[in-house]
Amino acid sequence: MRFHILKLFLMFEKKEMLVRFNVIFLEEAIEFISKLELKARRKIFYNIDKAKLLNDPKLFEKLEDDIWYFRTKYSTKQYRIFAFWDKTDNNNTLVIATHGVVKKSNKVSKSEIEKTKQIRKEYFEYKDRK
């Protein structure tokens, strides 16, 4: 275990800790995460921070179109935080985390993907009005 941690640290060090994107959590994502037990929350945030630095589909995976999700397995549960990209500002690439679910299988519900698409649509409509 210590070797893996050291190896991970060295990989981060080589990349000079270049963050590829920042994450903004919408209210529903915050509510979902805040209701989880402390160790699960820590693991989710650890994996999201790691995904910001590394291109690892085990942590951050594209589902379809512009819909992605962060993946975390803790204990016997699988957590998914759905998200989409906002690249409208050339200086700051954002990933918008919309909501989360606890999964019992590897299959992603079509309704969760549709929900994320709807939130994405509303997000950009709101942003365009500003």
Image: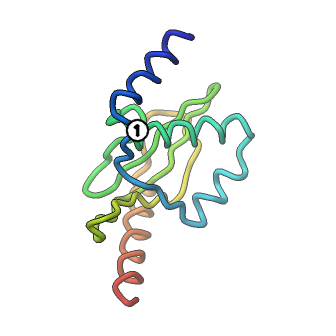
Q: How many marks?
A: 1
Residue at x 41%, y 75% (from the top left corner): 123
Residue 41 on image: x %, y %? 66, 42
Residue 124 on image: x %, y %? 36, 77
Quadrant placement of the C terminus:
bottom left
Q: Is residue 115 above or below residue 60?
A: below
Residue at x 56%, y 48% (from the top left corner): 101
Q: Nearer the viewer, residue 94 or 121?
A: 94
Residue at x 28%, y 51% (from the top left corner): 64
User: In the picture provided, is 40 more to the left or to the right than 13?
Assistant: right
Q: Nearer the viewer, residue 130 or 36?
A: 130
The residue at which mark 1 appears reads as 17
Task: Describe the element under mark 1 as helix, strand or loop.
Answer: loop
- The answer to which quarter of the image holds residue 16 is top left
Residue 112 on image: x %, y %? 45, 55
Quadrant placement of the N terminus:
top right
Q: How crowded is the residue under tag 1: few (<14 C-alpha within 10 Å), some, or many (20+)?
A: some
Q: Residue furthest bottom?
A: 129
- Residue type at mark 1 is Met
User: In the picture provided, is 64 more to the left or to the right than 110?
Assistant: left
Q: Is residue 37 above or below residue 29?
A: above
Name the image colouring: rainbow
Q: Is residue 115 above or below residue 10?
A: below
Q: Nearer the viewer, residue 64 or 31?
A: 31
- The answer to which quarter of the image holds residue 32 is bottom right
Residue at x 53%, y 57% (from the top left corner): 99
Residue 127 on image: x %, y %? 39, 81
Q: Is residue 42 above or below residue 87?
A: above
